[in-house]
Image: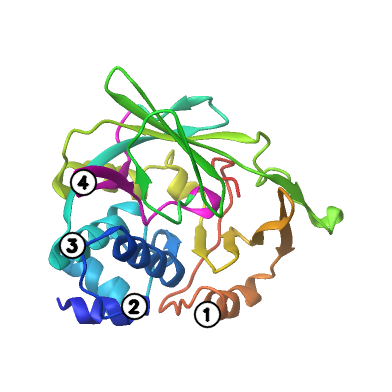
Amino acid sequence: MDIKEYFERIGYQNSRNKLDLQTLTEILQHQIRAVPFENLNIHCGEPMELSLEAVFDHVVRKKRGGWCLQLNNLFYWALTTMGFEAIMLGGQVYNSPACRYSKTLIHLLLMVTLSGKKYIVDAAFPFSCQPWEPLELISGKDQPQVPAIFHLTEENGTWYLAQTKRQHYVPNQEFIDSSILEKNNHRKIFSFTLEPRTIEYFKSVSEYAQTSPTSVMVKTSLCSLQTQEGVHGLLGTTLVYKKFNYKDNVDLVEFKTLKEEEIEEVLKHIFGINLETKFVPKRGDFFFTI
């Protein structure tokens, strides 16, 4: 594995070698705009592999995406290879329909320490919950970013990430898929502690997520890619684009229902994905919102 191959994959050409917040932010933004969050292998009858070597081959050489257990694992490798002080953490994702956090740690995220300050860095969360910048580990501080205002709060050693988002403007109301739109302006995202984890901890999570009939990843095929202005999303056959801050405190949201024969071209031209096996889109769970 070569860090130069990774840089080429994410389109990072800056030669500055400073291990500072600016470099960390640039690497994060290049990865989330080049590498989609996606679980399409599950819906192509192929495994979502966890080993770093397999992830590197899949994401860097085959130019695919992945989910948090893959993409933040790759991101951790890249950051530590560069010399950043980073550790893996585990998160419990908030399920809006059920109004609760997951019972187990199903999300992999990172914490990076810079000049004595700690930052939460996540390169693998779908749609508009994806932070575009590292989040300083400070409880109760508003941290405005392009996608939304993010908040970290701490209670008895557990940290909670949430966001305050803008209103939605949907020009073609007849095509709206209301189940995809988040109903509340304040959205809980995940909780976590600062206990270090390793990728081995998530092996059982990975197996369950891609094999259990009750897994949201098995029930729903999804793909998400950040842009300079917003985020593209594909849930089943529904294509969504959100442009952040289209008007003052308003995000533009556009929907399109695709025919199955259109999906291959959409994956190729919008998400940069070329699938090698037949993809069966699926939309059986309303866990994910744009």
Q: Residue at x 66, y 33 (%)?
A: 184
Give the side of residue 224 with respect to residue 173, left or right.
left
Q: Label 2 to label 3, Cα distance in Å? A: 16 Å
Q: Which residue is mark 3?
A: 77
The kind of secondary structure element at disc 2 is loop
Residue 148, how many percent across, how many down? 57, 47
The kind of secondary structure element at disc 3 is helix
> Which numbered mark, 2 or 4, is in the foreground of this view?
2
Q: Which residue is mark 2?
A: 12
Q: Looking at the image, tell me whether mark 2 or mark 4 is earlier in sequence order.
A: 2
Residue 130, how many percent across, how many down? 47, 52
Q: Residue at x 55, y 51 (%)?
A: 128
Q: Which residue is mark 1?
A: 268
Kindly indicate whether the residue at mark 3 contacts the one at mark 2 (C-beta within 8 angstroms): no
Circle 3 Cα neighbour tier, 10 Å, few/some/many (<14 / 14–19 / ≥20): some
Q: Do we see residue 62 in this rendering? A: no
Q: Looking at the image, tell me whether mark 1 or mark 3 is earlier in sequence order.
A: 3
Q: Label 4 to label 1, Cα distance in Å? A: 32 Å
Q: Looking at the image, tell me whether mark 2 or mark 3 is earlier in sequence order.
A: 2
Which kind of residue does numbered mark 4 sit on?
Met
Which kind of residue does numbered mark 1 sit on?
Lys
Start-end of magenta stretch: 104-129
Q: Which residue is mark 4?
A: 88
The kind of secondary structure element at disc 4 is strand
Which quarter of the rendered picture does the N terminus lie within?
A: bottom left
Which kind of residue does numbered mark 3 sit on?
Trp
